[in-house]
Amino acid sequence: MRKTLLMGAALLMTACGPRPAAEVEKVEIRTEVGDFGMLVNAIEITVSNPRSIKGLTAADFDLVNNVPGGYMNPATGKMYESFEDDGIVVSTDKNVLRIQATPFSKAGRREDFRNVIPWELHCAIDSALNVSPDQVSAEHIDVLDDCIKGSFSFGGLTREYMLHLPKDANGNVIPNVPLMVWQIGGGEYDKDMMTVATANRCLVSLAKEGVPCAALVFAIANPNYTYSASLYPEKIELIDRNNALQMAFIDQLIAEGKVDGSKLFCAGASSGGGCTMRFMMQFADRFKAAIPCCAMDPIVPIHKVEEKYPGQYADDIEKVWKGKCVYKWNGTDMELSTMNIDAFVNLPMYFAHAESDQTCKVASTYAYTEARKRLGAKNDQMIIYSNEDLAIFGVATVLSHFSWVPLLQDYSEGKPMNWLVKQL
């Protein structure tokens, strides 16, 4: 929020003649998926009389309760304050007034973790051009509006999906592109498709970087499989059944020429990091690389148990991997089977985790990498984010589980997404 509004109303009145009051026909917003939810980057106001918006400038508008996406400013340890500079740029196209601004949280400004004050747009020239969220009639979401939405059935399950296919300069879908499959976290389980798609930047990260790679996410309807899911065969069977459904859909995309079957990648965070591990246990020979992020423990219990001795987690994982440990589709049902250890360890993985993560402790990443190393993996990499690393991306220490934020934002040399892109 700017501290002052320039006094331009009188000048505009004399230069343009009497300004008719605006009669607003509709208000629309342009949004994008942020790290912590949806961001508004533009407000478009359609009026009945173009003269009512002629000559308006950024100085005539002010946004209030507009804050960056996120819960807490890591620099202050407090909730975010409204922007000092809104970054407003005003343009008109006939009877449409466009207010572009520094992207701000669609939800508004948080007073605390529970209470949120909605954003507002104020106009010093004409109060009819004031906007609050309840006036918005339509929302246009960057990237997601262009995604394919549908449902797919396999193995007794039906799941909704959203698929981004990159296009060329002429707007034509590019055939046979690489594919990145994102495994959702527990917070998105049993939620609607839009909640899944907007929870983080999983579908938009590569597209926003201009990388010609497809991105796919499924809404998984089974409840959060909880810690130590490996103790419950019915839970891990359902995880593996969901992954079999996703693989069947990917095979369909390959058969249709949409996706290059030699360039399949998988990534996921939290419960999705655990699902990524199990997906690779089933289909390691089909994928080129994987990125498990802050992974849960659907292989052996880790997060709610203490090691009896140093290295116990890795010992337990190694033992499981050498036996019948994964459910595979046998043509009629899921069957407990051994995994292809050679393909599994030859598949390169880049593990990501935050050092101070209290939700999925970093011990899981250390145990997975150690167990894979014992089985012969030589191409794994690992990044452990410090609190200072997280703060660079707006993640406060109290939210240190959110290591998918730097993962999906950072394409700098040597980082996981850079590593992935180099393999496309």
Image (cartoon, rainbow, N blue to C red):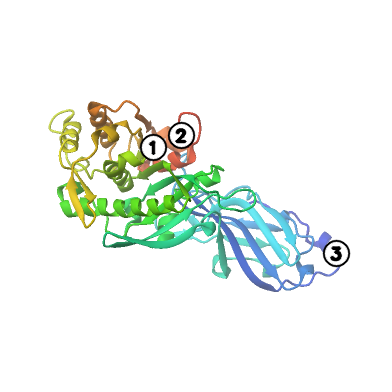
Amino acid type assigned to the residue bearing label 2 in the image:
Gln
Question: Disc 1 or 3, which lies upstream in sequence?
Answer: 3
Q: Earlier in the sequence, mark 2 or mark 3?
A: 3
State the residue position of label 1: 288
- The total of numbered circles placed on residues is 3
Amino acid, disc 3: Cys
The answer to which quarter of the image holds residue 30 is bottom right
Q: Give the residue pinned by disc 2.
A: 423
Residue 62, horizontal then vertical, whole percent:
65, 57
Task: For marks 1 and 3, give the one nearer the viewer.
Answer: 1
Q: Is residue 281 left or right of residue 72?
A: left
SS at circle 1: loop
Is 226 left, or right, of 48 in this rendering? left
Q: Nearer the viewer, residue 221 or 305?
A: 221
Q: Earlier in the sequence, mark 2 or mark 1?
A: 1
Q: What is the secondary structure assignment of the residue under circle 2?
A: loop
Kind of element beneath mark 3: helix
The amino acid at mark 1 is Lys
Dots 2 and 1: beta carbons under 8 Å?
yes
Residue 307's spot in the image, x, y percent?
16, 34
